């Protein structure tokens, strides 16, 4: 029996469909990232899963327990399922220790003290326990929000774009720390984001949501090498339309640059990136512009180049 079961859940607002019929089963301790652009239904889904929003159709089960929505439950939400928002939602006039303690006010004082101390230690917040949120960095504030959600030892943690306000260094560090912590706790995690890179750093189990509909689910390699749509393909990198080949595309990294060949172009732009130069190459036939990786940093603006690729790397994408 699956631990978390989402059965034909949908959400509509008048004539607008925010979430098309959605079904999913997760085992205990699973990590799943849901990736999609703004407005794809990610946050709506999380609020339904947490029992904080009313779905139009469908049910959510945690083990053998039906998760009731606000239309059926006097006090919305469950301690077993905690949702962490991107805007932290901390109490500004409470210290770090007080913020983390708030969900435990009705618990035994000795347990509360022990639990908060453990969370401060696990998230590296000991030195900041008496500070207020405004005295913390963005990464530290997010850690406090995570600790607050974990205080009651939830079985499922829902993360709604939790790293969107952090810089790249803070983000990568926090993702690494959070991944280790949640694996250790055995918590079931659903993480939604519009940043594929963030998802890949947290888990290899990815679901792509577009306009409220699931378009593909799998591991990162399968999604990258065998995308079903142009949208999925472009989440991983730009794609170049191959001239005279219907619905056929090639990634910049799969193009080889030569001084002889069939597809002739001229370099019209060059950008230095960490592992390669990114080139824009304007093709001679039709003026189409391709984005191409130059790992050896060999070519300059104005150079004539020929573009080669292996047919096995071609992506045939109809939508």
Image (cartoon, helix red, strand yellow):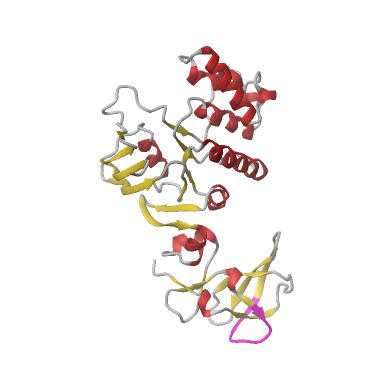
Q: Is residue 89 visible?
A: no
Residue appearing at x 47%, y 15% in the figure: 107
In depth, the one of 30 and 261 nearer the eye is 30
In-image side of 297 versus 223 (left or right): right
Q: Quadrant of the N terminus?
A: top left
> Which x, y percent locates residue 96?
60, 22
Eyeballing the image, is 228 above or below 154?
Answer: below
Taking the spot 48% from the left edge, 37% from the top edge, the residue there is: 187
Find out whether residue 277 is within the magenta segment.
Answer: no
Say whether residue 126 is left or right of residue 157: right
Q: Quadrant of residue 99?
A: top right
Q: Residue at x 73, y 72 (%)?
A: 300
Viewed as shown, does residue 262 lie left or right of 213?
right
Q: Residue shown at 54%/38% (left/top)?
A: 182
Residue 153 in sight in this render: yes
The residues colored magenta run 257-266
Q: Main secondary structure of the magenta part?
A: strand
């Amino acid at each position: 029996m699956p631990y978390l079961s989402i059965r034909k859940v949908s959400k509509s607002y008048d004539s607008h469909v925010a979430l098309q019929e959605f079904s999913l089963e997760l085992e205990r301790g699973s990590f799943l990232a849901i990736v999609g652009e703004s407005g794809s239904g990610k946050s709506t889904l999380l609020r339904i899963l947490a029992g904080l929003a009313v779905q139009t159709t469908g049910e959510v089960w945690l083990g053998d327990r039906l998760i009731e929505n606000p239309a059926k439950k006097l006090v919305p939400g469950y301690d077993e399922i905690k949702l962490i928002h991107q805007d932290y939602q901390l109490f500004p006039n409470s210290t770090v220790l007080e913020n983390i303690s708030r969900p435990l006010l009705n618990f035994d004082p000795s347990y509360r003290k022990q639990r908060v101390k453990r969370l401060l230690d696990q998230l590296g917040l000991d030195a900041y326990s008496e500070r207020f949120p405004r005295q913390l960095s963005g990464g530290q504030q997010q850690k406090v929000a995570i600790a607050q959600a974990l205080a009651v030892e939830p079985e499922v943690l829902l993360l709604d774009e939790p790293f969107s306000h952090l810089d790249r260094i803070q983000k990568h560090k926090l993702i690494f720390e959070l991944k280790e912590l949640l694996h250790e706790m055995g918590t079931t995690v659903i993480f939604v984001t519009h940043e594929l890179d963030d998802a890949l750093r947290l888990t290899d189990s990815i679901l792509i949501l577009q306009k409220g509909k699931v378009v593909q689910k799998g591991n990162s390699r399968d999604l990258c090498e065998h995308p079903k749509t142009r949208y999925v393909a472009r989440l991983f990198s730009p794609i170049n339309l191959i001239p005279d080949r219907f619905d056929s595309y090639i990634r910049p990294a799969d193009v080889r640059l030569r001084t002889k060949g069939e597809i002739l172009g001229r370099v019209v732009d060059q950008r230095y990136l960490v592992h390669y130069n990114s080139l824009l190459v304007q093709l001679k036939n039709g003026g189409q512009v391709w984005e191409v990786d130059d790992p050896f940093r060999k070519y300059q603006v104005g150079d004539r180049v020929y573009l080669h690729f292996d047919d096995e790397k071609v992506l045939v994408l109809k939508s």
